[in-house]
Amino acid sequence: MPDASHRMDDLRHRFHQLLTAQRTGALGTTSDQGWPYVSMAPYGIDPAHECLVIHVSELGAHTRYLLKRPQASFMICASETPGEPVHALPRITFQVEARPLERGSETWQSARAAYLERFPDAGFMIEFKDFHLFHLYIVRVRQVSGFGAAKTLHVADARRWLGEPPLS
């Protein structure tokens, strides 16, 4: 039977594997009427601040909702494989506090670099005044590695893993 250290290394490996393989997630916000609102958002990882980064436009309702209510959810899920069961898809759901970053600040520069590292073709959009970079700070995280393999992670572990390179 694997020891606790081996299990944590396996969780960390699967965590990084999913975040590396997927470049978009489902962003869940709350509408002005109190209804859940889910949209797709590309994301980067800012290891210096141990958080996720999104770059979103004010034209999107989700941006306006985040600016009013920063408590959100962000789910990253593996892609479906034809003929394979979907119930076992690896996924991670983060409950987050979304913080808009002040353009030009140190945290904005860090988030910008992290986002452009992942999406170099988005460089022109970074300069648009109606687009905002947000840090998504983890407050709770649930990782599903497969069917019947779900675990609520310690927030400190997940944050640390975002700041560390993947295990080889």
Image (spheres, helix red, strand yellow):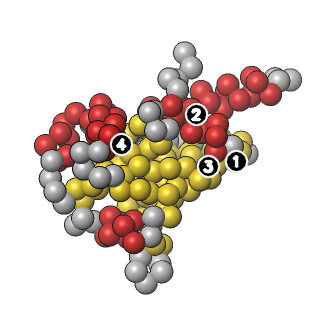
| Element assignment for label 3 | strand
- Coordinates of residue 96 in the picture (x, y in percent): 52, 55
| Element assignment for label 2 | helix
- Quote the CA–CA distance across marks 4 and 3: 23 Å
Disc on the earlier residue, 2 or 1: 1
- Residue at 42% from the left image edge and 37% from the top image edge: 45
Label pair 4/3, CB-CB below 8 angstroms: no
Disc on the earlier residue, 4 or 3: 4
Please state which amino acid type lies under the numbered disc 3: Val
Pointer 3 residue: 141
Disc on the earlier residue, 4 or 2: 4
Residue 13: quarter of image: top right
Disc on the earlier residue, 1 or 4: 4
Q: Depth-wise, is mark 2 or mark 3 nearer the camera? A: 2
Give the class, few, some or many, for how many residues have Cα within 10 Å of label 4's Cα (few <14, many ≥20): some
Label pair 1/3, CB-CB below 8 angstroms: yes
- Checking the image for residue 160, the label placed there is 2
Give the class, few, some or many, for how many residues have Cα within 10 Å of label 1's Cα (few <14, many ≥20): few
On screen, residue 90 versus residue 128, left or right, reads right
- Checking the image for residue 152, the label placed there is 1
- Quote the CA–CA distance across marks 1 and 4: 28 Å
On screen, residue 57 versus residue 43, left or right, reads left
Label pair 1/4, CB-CB below 8 angstroms: no
Q: Depth-wise, is mark 1 or mark 4 nearer the camera? A: 4
- Quote the CA–CA distance across marks 2 and 3: 13 Å
Quadrant in which the N terminus is drawn: top right
Please state which amino acid type lies under the numbered disc 1: Thr
Front residue of 7/103: it is 103
Pointer 4 residue: 107
In the displayed orientation, state which residue is furthest to the front: 105
- Coordinates of residue 24 in the picture (x, y in percent): 38, 46
In the displayed orientation, state which residue is furthest to the right: 1
